[in-house]
């Protein structure tokens, strides 16, 4: 399932049987004193692996390339900020490569949520889909599927993101590092409800993500497979 660990023959089998590629996208970004710097990419990678276990396909290694991070916003350290142009171009080239490799559905899972960052990634998807009608590309933030059933997620290192880390990698979270006083977003660099995070909430968010996203991905694959031969024959 992990692309980087697969042999050519194993990838060929996936391309024949279930040509879905998951691409988790994150950043290196300050996520409070209690969370690891790679939270966005780690989280998106684990979520992609769980979804892939359900639908089949492969998961690419997470891309650490964030724009509109906590560094230009408020100078938070240990954060790597890349340009909008680079983020956009990098995703575009990933899409072209995955198309060239024969994937028929590509699912981008965005773990870093800066509005302009998400916009840059969506622009790359748009540029790609203008050029190719197939493969089908689904670009979602990791909190979007749960929101389809009214469950709000998507904070910054707060109750939701910290809960997901407590679920996937409790060894990387240390809530005791948070100050005893009330939290402040601008000072602490995390959504102020971070202390309410629990592994149980993380498990619930992760489960909803898979439950809601899996049918959508399966439907895209069915659509792509049904139309692919005709589209290819007619020149795409
Ligand atoms: Zn985050």
Image (cartoon, helix red, strand yellow):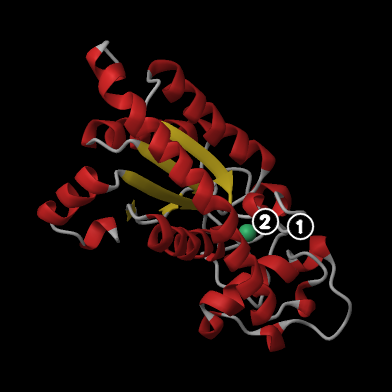
Residue beneath disc 1: 152
- Circle 1: element type: loop
Label 1 neighbour load within 10 Å: few <14, some 14-19, many 20+: some
> Residue 18 at what x, y percent from top left?
29, 47
Q: Quadrant of the C terminus?
A: top left
Label 2 neighbour load within 10 Å: few <14, some 14-19, many 20+: many
Instruction: Indicate the quadrant where residue 36 lies.
Output: bottom right
Viewer-side label of 1, 2:
2
Q: Residue furthest right?
A: 182
Could you tell me if the residues under marks 1 and 2 are in contact, i.e. CB atoms within 8 Å?
yes
Picture residue at 31% right of the left edge, 18% below the top? 231
Instruction: Indicate the quadrant where residue 53 lies.
Output: bottom left
> Residue 120 at what x, y percent from top left?
56, 33
Instruction: Indicate the quadrant where residue 129 lies.
Output: top left
Residue beneath disc 2: 146
Side of 169 relative to 155 (left or right): left
């Amino acid at each position: 399932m992990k692309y980087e660990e697969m042999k050519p023959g194993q990838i060929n089998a996936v391309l024949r049987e279930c040509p879905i590629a998951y691409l988790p996208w994150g950043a290196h970004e300050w996520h409070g004193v209690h969370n690891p710097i790679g939270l966005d990419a780690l989280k998106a990678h684990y979520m992609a692996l769980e979804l892939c276990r359900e639908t089949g396909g492969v998961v690419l290694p997470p891309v650490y390339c964030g724009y509109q991070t906590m560094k230009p916003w408020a100078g938070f350290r240990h954060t790597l900020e890349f340009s909008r142009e680079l983020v956009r171009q990098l995703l575009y080239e990933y899409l072209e490569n995955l198309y060239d490799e024969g994937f028929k559905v590509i699912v981008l899972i965005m773990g870093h949520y800066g509005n302009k960052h998400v916009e840059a990634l969506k622009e790359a998807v748009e540029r790609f889909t203008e050029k190719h009608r197939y493969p089908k590309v689904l670009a979602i933030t990791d909190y979007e599927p749960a929101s389809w059933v009214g469950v709000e997620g998507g904070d910054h290192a707060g109750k939701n993101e910290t809960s997901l880390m407590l679920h996937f990698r409790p060894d990387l979270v240390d809530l005791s590092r948070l100050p005893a006083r009330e939290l402040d977003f601008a000072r602490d660099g995390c959504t102020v409800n971070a202390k309410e995070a629990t592994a149980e909430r993380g498990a619930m968010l992760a489960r909803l993500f898979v439950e809601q996203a899996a049918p959508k991905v399966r439907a895209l694959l069915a659509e792509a497979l049904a139309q692919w031969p005709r589209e290819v024959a007619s020149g795409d």
